[in-house]
Amino acid sequence: MVGPEVLERIAARRAELDELEEQLLKQWDEVKAERDELTVAERFLTRMSERTAGERTAVAPASAQVGGRAMLLVPHRGDSVDETALPDDYRRILAIVRAAGGPVQVRAVGEELGLQVEVRGKLEPLRARLVKLADRGWLHKRGDGRFTARL
């Protein structure tokens, strides 16, 4: 005959195993949920990389929505990308820098564009565009803050 002490041990062990089973089921649900999230993220990234590849090959300037505002994308300068891929504003800035024939300050480009160059706040967005053109390989930013056209 089995004593009450053995039955208590069996019941205690059964309770431990039930608790462990509950923990494992909870972990299993978490693992499945995370795997589902990874699958969705992978699909999203695949679509975005395909879309980005399509935008890189497009000739017309592309735009994107950021914070509900349309933002123009300035492509990196490369062998297969020419100036027609740039938005009109950027092409005009590039033409002004090229026409200068040498290093040009932001203020001079602003004057050519008809901006109020006396107001510093009017030049900062222009400076950002010039820097973006330099970062993407269309212009060269010199150490003194002037810009020159790349050949």
Image (cartoon, grey):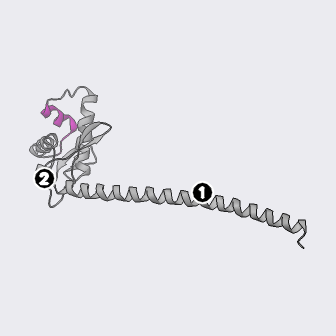
| CA neighbours of label 1 inside 10 A, class few (<14), some (14 to 19), many (20+) | few
Q: Is residue 149 magenta?
A: no
Identify the residue at horizontal 66%, vertical 62% (top origin).
Answer: 21
- Which callout, 2 or 1, points at the residue further toward the start of the chain? 1
SS class, disc 1? helix
Report whether 112 appears left or right of 130: left
Amino acid type assigned to the residue bearing label 2 in the image: Val
Q: Which residue extends farthest left?
A: 99
Crowd band around label 2 with a 10 angstrom C-alpha radius: few (<14), some (14–19), many (20+): some
Q: Amino acid at mark 1?
A: Lys
Q: Judge by depth and name the residue closer to the eye, 17 or 125.
A: 17
Q: Residue at x 14, y 33 (%)?
A: 113
Q: Quadrant of the N terminus?
A: bottom right
* Rendered residue at 14%/50% (across/down): 85
Q: Quadrant of residue 131?
A: top left
Tell me residue 59's x, y (percent).
13, 52
Residue 49 is tagged as none
Q: Disc 1 designates what residue?
A: 26
- Describe residue 37's horizontal placement relative to residue 125 as left or right: right
